[in-house]
Image (cartoon, rainbow, N blue to C red):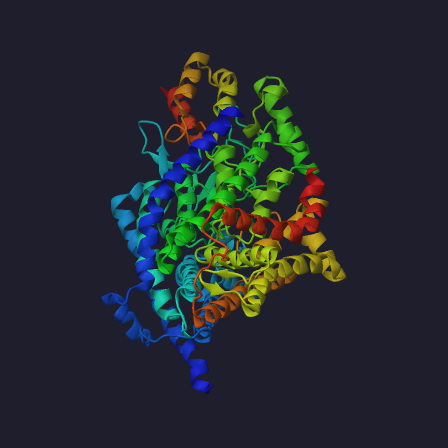
Amino acid sequence: MSRSSTLRPYAVALRAMLVATLALGLVYPLLITGVAAVAMPDRAAGSLVTAGAADEPARTVGSSLIGQSFTDPDGVALPGYLQSRPSAAGEGYDGGASSGSNLGPENTDLVAAVEQRRTEVAQREGVDVADVPADAVTASASGLDPHISPAYALLQVPRIARERGLPESEVESLMRSSIAGRDLGFLGEERVNVLAVNIALDELSVG
Amino acid sequence: MGAALLLALAQVAVLAVVLMAVHRPLGDHMARTFTTERDLAVERGLYRLIGVDPRGEQTWRAYLRGVLALTVVGIGLVYLLQRTQAILPDAVGMPAVEPGLAFNTAVSFVTNTNWQSYSPEATIGYTVQLLGLAVQNFVSAAVGIAVAIALVRGFARRRTGTLGNVWVDVTRAVVRILLPLSVVAALVLVAGGVVQNLTGFTDVATLAGGTQQIPGGPVASQEAIKLLGTNGGGFYNANSAHPFENPSAWISLLQVALMLVIPFSLPRTFGTVIGDRRQGRTILAVMAGLFVISLAALTWLELRGAGTAPQLAGAAMEGKEQRFGIVASTLYAAAGTLTSTGAVNSMHDSYTSLGGMVPMVNMMLGEIAPGGVGSGLYGMLVLAIVAVFMGGLMVGRTPEYLGKRLGPREIKLASLYILVTPVLVLAGTALSFAIPGVRADVEATSIANPGVHGLSEVLYAFTSAANNNGSAFAGLTADTPWFTTALGVAMLLGRLLPILLVLALAGSLASQDTVPATSGTLPTSRPLFAGLLGGVAVVVTALTYFPVLALGPLAEGL
C-alpha cells in the first residue's frame, strides 16, 4: 500500500472534524441559545426567582430549580425557615460543586451521619425519631435538590409557626398549598419547593 | 411498595407506547438514510469540502481506516483544546487541563464513553464543552451507527468486497438523524427548564444571608445529543441529577426516551435493510425482554431498601432526588447502563448493595438491551452469531444466519468480540490490586468506601470504561495517574477492538454468497431463537463475571 493511501483518511478526517467543529460545536449550540433566549428567556437563564418587600426593588435570591441552605454561617438551622435536605455539594448547596455523598449503604460514616441527622431533626421538630422521613436524613444526588417531601415539610410547620409568631393553621395551609403533585399525575414524587415556601413565609410575616 | 410498583408500571407503559409508536417511522427513516443513492445538497457540499467521492465503495479495511482516522484526529483535537484552555475565549476562568486527565477525557468522549474523571464545574470551560466535547458526542454516535450499518450490509450483500462508504455513513447519520433530533430535543428541554445560556456563574444573595453561585452554560444543546447519541457526559458533575440538566420527572422520562429511541429503532432498520422485518422484531424482542427483567429487579431491590443505612433512614434515598423518588431513579439507571449512555439521575454508589450490582451487570451484558447507538445492534448481532453456532452444535449442523454460512473465520471473530471487554475489565480490576504500588495508591487515594464496596467501585470503573458506558460508582477518585491511564487504555481498546472485529466480520459476510434456507436451517425469527439468544447473552455474562461479583456486591449484600 502506498504511503499516500495510508495518510489520506487522516487528511479527510481532519477536514471533516474541522467542519463538524464549526457546525456542531458552534452553529448548533448558538442557534439553540438564540432561540431559547428569544422564546423562553426565563427558563434559559435558569428560572431565577426574586423576592423583597413591596417598598424596595425585588432582588434575585436564587433559582426555583436550585436548592439552598437556610442556616447561619456556622451551619445551624435558622428556625424560622423551612429546612432543605442534607447536601454533599461543597459545604452544602454549593452551586459550583454539585455532588452526591457517594457513600455506600454499609459505609459506617453514612450510618453515623444518618443516625446523627435523625436525632437532630427529631430534637429540632420535637418529634419521635421514628417520625423523621427518609429525605430529611439523606443527601440528594446533586446536592442541590430544591425539594423536600410533603411529610418533611409538614413536620416543620409547628416550629416555623412558633418562631414566626404565626398561627399554625396559617403556616400549615401555606405548606399544603405548596405541595406539588406528581408530574402528569404519575411521574416522580410529590414535593415541596423549599425556597418558594420560605419566600412566601417572609411575605406572610411582613404582611 | 404496592403503590410505588403501580407508578413504576405506569411510567414503563407510557415509555413503551412512545417507543413503539416512534420506532417504525424512525427505523424506516434510518433504513432509507443508509440505502438511498440520493445525496442532499448540503451533503454534496460537505463531500466536496472534505474531499471524498460519495459513490466510492470501501472494503472493510478502508472503512476501518476511516474510523481509525476519525478517532485519532478526534482525540488529538480534544486533547489540544483542553491543553490550551487557558488562552481560549469563554473558558469561564478555567486553566489548562493536566496532560493525563486531558488524555483520559479526550479518549473518553471520542470513544462514546463519556467517563468523567474530572468535575466539570471546576475543570471544563464553555469553549472546550462546545468545540471539543459536544462535537465528539455527535461524531462518536455517528461512527457507532455507521459500523452497525456496515455489519447489516455485510448480511444483506452478496459476493461483494465492499461495505459502503464510511464518510457518507457518518455524514448522513449526523445530518439526517442526530442533528435534526437534537435541535427538537434541545428546545423541548429548555421548555422544561434546562438552562441554555453563556453567562457563567452568577452570584446571588440568599434569603439566609449567604451567597450562592448559580451556574450557567449551553446545557440543553449538550444534553440533547448526550442522550440521543448515548454519550452520557454531564455538563455538571451531578450529571442528570443536577436540576439544571434534569429539572423534573417528566423531563427525566423524556431523557430516558431519548436514550432509548435510536437503539430500539435500529432493529427495525436492520430488518428493513436485510429484507426480513421478522428478524428485526426478534432482536427487538430480546432487547426489550432483557430490559424489562433488569429494570424490574433493580426497582424491586431499591424499593426494598436493604442495608444498614437505607434501613436506618427508612428508604434508599441517599443519592436520589426528591422530585424523582426511587422508581424514576431506577428507570434512569437501567436506561443509562443498558444503553452505553452512562448518564445518571441518581448516584449508583449509594444504591443498596444488590441494587448497585444491577447497573454493573447491565454493562457486563455488553450493553445490548438495547445498547449504545449502533454498538447495541452490532453487539446483539454478534451474540446472535454465537447463539446460532451453539444451536448448530446441539443438532450437529453447519450454522448459518440470515443466509450466510458461519464458518471458522466468522466464529473466531465473534468469539474474540465477546472476549475483549471481559479481558479488559478483569485485567484492569486485577492489576489495580495486584501491583503493590498501584494498590497502595488505589486504596489510599481513589477508593471512597472501605471494604468490599471499594472493590465494587474499581470493578464498576473498569466495566464502565471497557464497555464505553461512562457511568460510575462516583465515589472513586479517578483523577490519578493509574486510573486516567488504565481507564483511558480500556476505553480505547474497548471501542476499537470490537469495531475492528465487527468490520472484519462484515467484510467476510459480504464476500459470501447466500445459501438458501433448508429444512435444516435454524429459524431465527421465532420465539425459540429469541429465548436462545437471551439465554446465551445471560450465560456468557454470568459465567464470566460471577466470581468477581461474588467478591464485591454479592459479598456486601448477602
The residue positioned farthest toward the left in the image shown: B41
Is residue B113 in sight in this rendering? Answer: no
Residue A95 on image: x %, y %: 48, 43
Residue B444 on image: x %, y %: 71, 52
Residue in the picture at 36% in, 48% down? B23
Q: Which quadrant, please, contains the N terminus of chain B? A: top right
Q: Which quadrant, please, contains the C terminus of chain B? A: top right
The residue positioned farthest toward the bottom in the image shown: A2
Q: Is residue B35 above or below residue B245?
A: below
Front one among A83 and B163: B163
Residue in the picture at 58% in, 67% down? B412
Q: Is residue A117 above or below residue A9?
A: above
Q: Left of B406 or right of it: where is A175? A: left
Front one among B416 and B254: B416
Tell me the quarter of the picture where residue B305 sits: top right
Residue B416 on image: x %, y %: 59, 64
Looking at the rendered structure, the number of numbered marks drawn on it comes to 0
Q: Left of B216 or right of it: where is B494? A: right
Q: Left of B526 or right of it: where is B49? A: left
The residue positioned farthest toward the right in the image shown: B436
